[in-house]
Amino acid sequence: MPVVATPVTPNVVTRDQVRMFMRDYAPNNILLDAPEFSDRDLNLAIEMAVSAFNTVTPQTNFTPASFPQQLTYLLLIGTTRFLLMSESFLQVRNQATVQDGDIAPIGISDKAELYASLSQKLKAEWDELTRGVKTQNNLEGAYATLSSGYLNVSRFNRS
């Protein structure tokens, strides 16, 4: 009998949520007749989005399982951005455009610019949201802990 393991702490963003956001379902992918991104691709994208968040100062040490629940949208945007950027590399590498007579050029894997453009739009939103979250967390972490060099200076002599 096979053992089926369930993660104790599931990821904040699930593969199904990413697929729903990107509309990455077999019926929607007419040319592929399958989802564009594998489960392995989605897992890597989630890990890389968390890693990218962690590298923004002030640095943090989140994992996909420990990522704050209230930042689900941010992680979804970062995950999708990574997938689109990765796919744009594949599209550039495999681009081949063919023209026959008076028929308009037909391209195979010629959507690199579209993927890159979508990736850049998501990156702009991700950068803005991440910077705001990191700034707010940094300020909240400093509340009531900052002191002044003049804390122990007084007009009165203490003996």
Image (cartoon, rainbow, N blue to C red):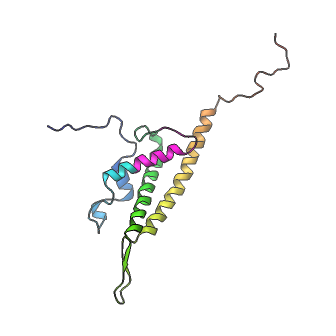
Residue beneath the point at 55% across and 45% down: 56
Measured as percent of width and height from the top left, residue 8 is found at 33, 34
Q: Residue furthest bottom?
A: 102
What is the magenta range? 45-61
As drawn, 122 above or below 75? below
Residue beneath the point at 60% across and 43% down: 135
As drawn, 135 above or below 24? above
Q: To which quarter of the image does residue 134 belong?
A: top right
Examine the structure image and report whether residue 44 is included in the region drawn in magenta: no
Helix, strand or loop for the magenta stretch, by majority: helix
As drawn, 128 above or below 119? above
Measured as percent of width and height from the top left, residue 151 is found at 75, 24
Residue beneath the point at 53% across and 45% down: 55
Q: To which quarter of the image does residue 136 belong?
A: top right
Residue beneath the point at 60% across and 38% down: 138
Measured as percent of width and height from the top left, residue 139 is found at 62, 37
